[in-house]
């Protein structure tokens, strides 16, 4: 009889009505390199205690490193998996129903390179039911310097002919003093000294 009373109590206890929610990923422009966050917000969280999201992004532009809870969900518990690169899995469990608009969780990224990456929901589940609406976000990284080719005029060297310095010949037999001992010297020697 005791088991029957518990079953009746469970069946007659009013149950909460669960509603699907609407969720958005923010658009972020990263102009200063360093960690930044992409907010996962809701305009209508439904009457939910649990949220599960799978998110895809381009890991060539930014790399997910974790998450943090803002004040809207500061009493909730969460788990985040940022592996493999390019995907994020977030599970959020709250002790009380969220109501109104707010940021559920801030996804933390580090910039990798200049570029644009969409941040897309690949799965959005609220209390084990699909979300009513999930809107993608975007990351626009522009913090890395863009190399600009600079044309620098550099002087080109023009070959110059450097004359070989004349060396005064001290050669024996250079009778005509032209710096060489040759047949002309033979003629001078003959003329001056005889054959």
Image: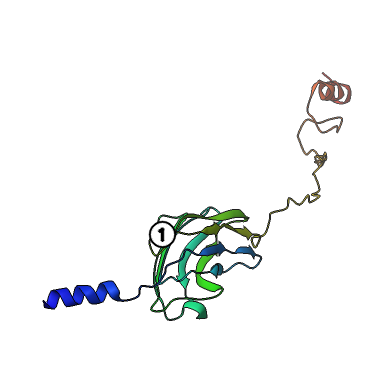
| Residue lying at the far left of the rendered structure | 1
Colour convention: rainbow
Residue 35 in sight in this render? no
- Where does residue 193 sit, x and y in percent of width and height? 85, 25
Q: Residues within 10 Å of mark 1 (few under 14, many from 20)?
A: some
180 w.r.t. 143: above or below: above
- Where does residue 171 sit, x and y in percent of width and height? 76, 35
Kindly identify the residue that appears in the image at 79 percent across and 38 percent down.
169
Looking at the rendered image, the quarter that the C terminus falls into is top right
Is residue 30 left or right of 175 when viewed as pictured?
Answer: left
Looking at the rendered image, the quarter that the N terminus falls into is bottom left
Is residue 157 left or right of 31 when viewed as pictured?
Answer: right
Kindly identify the residue that appears in the image at 80 percent across and 30 percent down.
180
Residue denoted by label 1: 129
Kindly identify the residue that appears in the image at 64 percent across and 60 percent down.
144
SS at circle 1: strand
Residue nearest the viewer, comparing 1 with 48: 1
- Where does residue 63 sit, x and y in percent of width and height? 50, 60
125 w.r.t. 104: above or below: above
Residue nearest the viewer, comparing 24 with 149: 24
């Amino acid at each position: 009889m005791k088991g029957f009373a518990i079953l009746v109590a469970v069946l007659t206890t009013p149950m909460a009505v669960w509603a699907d929610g609407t969720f958005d990923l923010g658009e972020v422009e990263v102009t200063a390199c360093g960690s930044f966050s992409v907010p996962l917000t809701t305009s209508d969280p439904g009457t939910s205690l649990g949220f599960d999201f799978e998110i895809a992004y381009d890991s060539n532009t930014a790399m997910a490193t974790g998450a943090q809870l803002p004040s809207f969900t500061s009493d909730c518990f969460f788990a985040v998996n940022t592996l493999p690169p390019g995907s994020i899995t977030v599970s959020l469990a709250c002790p009380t129903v969220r109501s109104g608009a707010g940021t559920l969780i801030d996804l933390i990224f580090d910039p990798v390179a200049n570029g644009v990456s969409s941040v897309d929901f690949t799965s959005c589940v609220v209390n084990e039911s699909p979300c009513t609406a999930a809107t993608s976000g975007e990351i626009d990284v522009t913090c890395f310097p863009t190399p600009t080719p600079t044309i620098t005029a550099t002087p080109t060297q023009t070959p110059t002919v450097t004359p070989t310095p004349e060396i005064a010949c001290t050669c024996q037999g250079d009778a005509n003093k032209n710096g060489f001992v040759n047949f002309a010297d033979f003629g001078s020697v003959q003329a001056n000294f005889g054959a």
